[in-house]
Image (tube, rainbow, N blue to C red):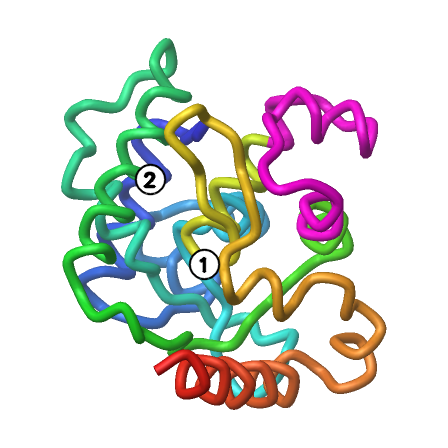
Amino acid sequence: MKLVMPTSFQVLRVLNDRKRQTAPNLAEILDKDSRYMSNQLNDLAGQGLVRRVGPSDNSKMFEITERGQIAIEYADEYSHQEASEFGRLVNRVLKDRRASGSNREMPVSTIYLSAEDFELLNSLQEKDGKSIEEIATTIDRLPGIIEAGLARLEAEKMVDQGKEGEYRLAKLGSLVSGREKEYENMGAREFTNKVTKELVLEDRAEE
């Protein structure tokens, strides 16, 4: 998890305090260039620390995620030299908190996925557990990019990381993977509603 010091944490704190904001609003609040702030938000969204919200799938309004709130809590432990370790720390805390809560916690926000996200999810369909290196070989992308993408998908409860460091599809990821055409045709909000209903039905069938 690579962040820009101190700007990334400033953005997260503003979103945490003032809820939803656009890039121009944040630029005004933090006295930064609007285009630079837009790039910052896109980068933070790619790492699962913030997400787009609003009636449009291309909304320019952002809010902080649970993962972003945890990053704020542990901000003192971040350094550029230990960026990857910090990302793993945030993931562990997030996983522990969710494990101690309801096992039937449902997605509460719209599912936003890129072509690269679907590529990662689809690569995990082929085998029950893959290392970052195996995935990188399969889809020909750098391990660092793979790790960042998996961290974001784990924050969105679509993949799980095992004790040996291997990744596998979580229940939500299993429902989503392989459905990129459907996602593209339906749009993020309608697709999310459909998948959420499927997840509820699947949970009930297991009871």
Residue picked out by circle 1:
156
Q: Position of residue 58 (x, y in %)?
A: 65, 74
Is 60 placed left or right of 91 in the picture?
right
Disc on the earlier residue, 2 or 1: 2
Residue picked out by circle 2:
91
Most extreme residue toward the top, as rendered? 81
Q: Residues within 10 Å of mark 2 (few under 14, many from 20)?
A: many
Label 2 – label 1 distance at C-alpha: 11 Å
Task: Check disc 1 and report its element: helix, strand or loop.
Answer: loop
Magenta segment boundaries in residue numbering: 121-146
Which residue appears at 17% of the width and 34% of the height? 74
25 and 157: which one is in front? 157
Q: Is residue 41 visible from the viewing direction of this image?
A: no
Image quarter (top left, top right, bottom left or bottom right) of the N terminus: top left
Which residue appears at 37% of the width and 29% of the height? 163
Task: Check disc 2 and report its element: helix, strand or loop.
Answer: helix
128 and 159: which one is in front? 128
Q: Amino acid at mark 1?
A: Glu
